[in-house]
Amino acid sequence: QLQASGGGLVQAGGSLSLSCAASGSGFMINEMGWYRQALGKQRELVATVTSGGSTNYAESVQGLSFISMDYAKKTVFLRMNSLKPEDTAVYYCVARWRYYGRTNERESWGRGTQVTVSS
């Protein structure tokens, strides 16, 4: 189960932090990250980070957002700076994981948290 926190209302140019923790036992995280879905649009990648620390950012947030993971706590953090109204969306946490001793990867999604950037 993924539990996200953060989000809310922020003025344009401001910053916001999101976090998402995976709960449960007997599994390991391969990758965690964030996607977002604006009203009337498709869900899109924001950023992901692997257990090895490799990151991947959408071009639109490159250099403005920073993702990190506390592997032991199975928690991912996203810091978003210089936010714009077009960053307004529901942000979804994702975790790609597998049970210990298994090779098949599974994917879980959080329920989403609203981020609204006012102009």
Image (cartoon, grey):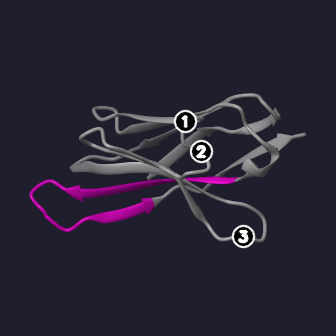
The residue under label 1 is which amino acid type? Gly
Do the numbered discs 1 and 2 sit on residues whose CB atoms are within 8 Å?
Answer: yes
46 left or right of 68 in image: right
Asked which secondary structure carries label 3, the reply is: loop
The residue under label 3 is which amino acid type? Lys
Q: Which residues make up the magenta segment?
A: 90-108
Comparing 43 with 86, the one in front is: 86
Total label count? 3
Closer to the eye: label 1 or 3: 1
* Residue at x-position 14% and y-position 64%: 103
Q: Earlier in the sequence, mark 1 or mark 3?
A: 3
What quarter of the picture does the C terminus occupy? Answer: top right
37 left or right of 94 in image: right
Q: Which residue is mark 3?
A: 41
Do the numbered discs 1 and 3 sit on residues whose CB atoms are within 8 Å?
Answer: no
The residue under label 2 is which amino acid type? Val
74 left or right of 19 in image: left
Residue 46 forms part of the magenta stretch: no
Q: Which residue is mark 2?
A: 61
Q: Earlier in the sequence, mark 3 or mark 2?
A: 3
Res. 63 mark: 1
91 left or right of 9 in image: left
Do the numbered discs 3 and 2 sit on residues whose CB atoms are within 8 Å?
Answer: no
Residue 111: quadrant of the picture: bottom right
* Residue at x-position 88% and y-position 40%: 118
Asked which secondary structure carries label 1, the reply is: loop
Q: Position of residue 42 (x, y in %)?
A: 65, 71
* Residue at x-position 81% and y-position 46%: 85
Q: Residues within 10 Å of mark 3 (few under 14, many from 20)?
A: few
Comparing 2 with 93, the one in front is: 93
